[in-house]
Image: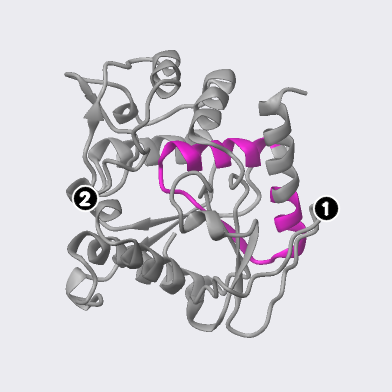
Amino acid sequence: MDDLDQLEAQSIFILREAYRKLKPLAMLWSLGKDSNVMIWLARKAFLGRVPFPVMHVDTGKKFPEMYKFRDEYTKKWDLELLLGDCPPVEDIDPTLPPAARSAARKTAGLAAMIDKYKLAGVIAGIRRDEQATRAKERVFSPRGSGHKWDVRNQPPEFWDQYATPHEPGMHVRVHPLLSWREIDIWRYIERENIPLVDLYFAKDGKRYRSLGDQDITSPVESNAVTVAEVIAELETSRTSERAGRAMDHESEDAFERLRVAGYL
């Protein structure tokens, strides 16, 4: 097995463990490259069909290309899609910096969906290499009452044994891509020919490396118009993947506050 085979096998095992242990279960679908890889892995894990719903927590501020992709691939991949809205920014904690406050709308929208569907587990496509706070996560990460994350009190995970504590008001976030790197994601996309929103590829000397809301996401300079060219670019790049996310240029404390409160 090469590195991608090992990552794929680990993620499929995690997805199957989540499906076995946590019901009801749903997967977050942000429409970005990582969550598309997650859906691809879930289809492999369960004989071609995702056996649980996928959730899009919609801020109403995504790029038109993302909504078009969602509608097309919901049908092509035969997905059960759950849509949730987010509250207006005026309802969000005013002490947060502007971009973090805007992003926090998703935290509230996700919490409402978890409560509405009484979810015991939510599968999310975060990776340790994306951001320092995310590196503190477990593969199976319990969220307490009110969706709070106790970053200093997480269960140990030895020998691929994952705890699934479930008390009233709790749920578990499952992270099948936690050990993947950005370049692993792209190499897997190339190997498997996984569809993507075309904003990831350069136009007029710029492309998006990370996709979010239009008002808090910016493109980076790039001439990469194919997956192979993106991979070649990443092999020499020292720029952070989330350099185009406005909230990542605000205080680290703001991002951790969002994570503790239930941010994706």
Give residue 40's position: percent from left, percent from top: 59, 35
Q: Position of residue 241 (x, y in %)?
A: 37, 38
Position of residue 19 relative to residue 184, above or below, is below
Horizontal and vertical percent for residue 91? 22, 77
Residue 85 seen in the current view: no
- The verdict on residue 41 being magenta is yes
Which portion, as a residue range, is magenta? 15-44
Q: Is residue 10 above or below residue 200?
A: below
N-term mark: 1 or 2: 1
Q: How far apart in space, not on screen, are marks 1 and 2 (Cα)?
A: 39 Å
Residue 51 shows in the view: yes
Q: Quadrant of residue 243?
A: top left
Residue ID at (75%, 67%):
163
Q: Identity of the amino acid at label 1?
A: Trp
Residue at the spot x=21%, y=20% of the render? 203
Does the stretch in magenta take in 93? no
On residue 216, the disc is: 2
Residue for badge 1:
159
| Residue type, numbered disc 2 | Ile
